[in-house]
């Protein structure tokens, strides 16, 4: 039997709202499939009304290293940054940012433990796999780093109210895949924003305007409502643009 790995200096850093049940199995399953491998962490509830908050409170009994806080939603970046602030209070070194509809397997955590032992880096990126009820498909790897040393002082920014990102390169790319479970309804958003952008990247090999953060360009170009959403930040460099598809 394979011993359960435990990342001693690493903790979960998540924001949630109304995740009692989701495409991945819900908030209870998220915690039970993640916290056994970590040293603790923080979860910020941004206004759940479906019982998510009550489930979180019960799970802190089983996982005393998990701390739950409340903050009314005022944008994804605002919530993420608050989660980082509270994470600093845990005394843990590495923040592992995951959403409640994302999962890693036990084998993934074993690989992650081995990777961290052999690396002196402070930020890490992952592969991603979108899993729909009827199919699965890999997504492109221009995500912000998901695992990083909290002392780096990284900060999230909102982009057109659609994405939040860290103005920092992805970091060391690990050969580990985060499985993102999606519902049928999420396909519309993907087709409206992501798919046209992916086709353009394949055709031209670059995003429309390399002087801006690619997420801003894509959101403004493919989502007509994005110009009205505000909170656009242009401080990010082109480091988020993937080297290859």
Image: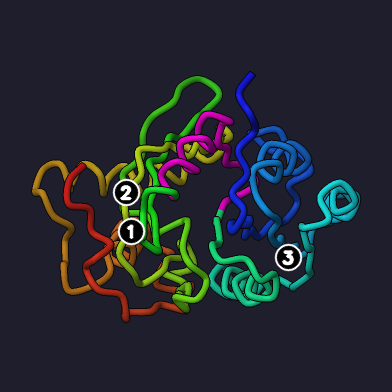
Q: What's the distance in space between the residues labelled 3 and 2, CA to CA?
A: 30 Å
For the record, the magenta segment spans: 98-116
Q: Which of 177 and 195 is in front in this view?
A: 177
Q: Which residue is drawn at 69% across and 59% down?
A: 41
Give the labeled residue for mark 3. Answer: 46
Q: Is residue 1 above or below residue 37?
A: above
Per the image, label 2 sits on a secondary structure element best described as strand
Per the image, label 3 sits on a secondary structure element best described as loop
Disc 3 or 2, which lies upstream in sequence? Answer: 3
Give the labeled residue for mark 2. Answer: 173
Give the labeled residue for mark 1. Answer: 170
Q: Residue at x 48, y 39 (%)?
A: 178
Disc 1 or 3, which lies upstream in sequence? Answer: 3
Q: In this view, does 161 lie to the left or right of 49?
A: left
Disc 2 vs disc 1: which is toward the camera?
2
Q: Is residue 234 left or right of residue 108?
A: left
Q: What's the distance in space between the residues labelled 1 and 3, CA to CA?
A: 26 Å
Q: Position of residue 58 (x, y in %)?
A: 91, 50
Disc 1 vs disc 3: which is toward the camera?
1
Q: Where is residue 142 in the image (x, y as percent from the top left)?
A: 31, 53
Q: State yes or no: discs 2 and 1 in contact (Cβ < 8 Å).
A: yes
Disc 3 vs disc 2: which is toward the camera?
2
Q: What's the distance in space between the residues labelled 2 and 1, CA to CA?
A: 7 Å
Q: Is residue 50 at least partly visible in the picture?
A: no
Q: Residue at x 31, y 47 (%)?
A: 141
Q: In this view, does 95 lie above or below 87?
A: above
Quarter of the image where the N terminus is located: top right
Q: Which of 28 and 202 is in front in this view?
A: 28
């Amino acid at each position: 039997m394979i011993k359960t790995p435990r990342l001693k200096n690493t903790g979960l850093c998540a924001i949630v709202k109304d995740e009692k049940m989701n495409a991945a199995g819900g908030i209870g399953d998220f915690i039970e499939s993640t916290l056994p491998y970590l040293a603790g962490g923080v979860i910020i509830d941004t206004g759940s009304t479906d019982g998510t908050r009550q489930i979180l409170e019960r799970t802190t009994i089983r996982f005393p290293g998990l701390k739950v806080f409340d903050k009314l939603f005022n944008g994804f970046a605002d919530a993420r940054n608050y989660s980082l602030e509270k994470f600093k209070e845990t005394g843990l070194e590495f923040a592992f940012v995951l959403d409640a509809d994302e999962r890693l397997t036990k084998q993934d955590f074993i690989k992650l433990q081995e990777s961290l032992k052999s690396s002196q880096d402070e930020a890490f990126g992952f592969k991603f796999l979108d899993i729909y009820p009827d199919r699965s498909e890999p997504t492109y790897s221009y995500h912000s780093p998901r695992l990083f040393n909290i002392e780096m002082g990284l900060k999230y920014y909102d982009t057109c109210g659609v994405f939040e990102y860290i103005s920092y390169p992805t970091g060391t790319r690990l050969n580990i895949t985060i499985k993102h479970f999606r519902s049928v309804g999420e396909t519309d958003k993907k087709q409206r924003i992501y798919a046209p952008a992916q086709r353009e990247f394949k055709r031209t090999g670059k995003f429309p305007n390399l002087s801006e953060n690619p997420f801003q360009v894509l959101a403004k170009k493919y989502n007509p409502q994005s110009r009205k959403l505000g909170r656009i930040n242009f401080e990010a460099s082109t480091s988020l643009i993937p080297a290859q598809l």
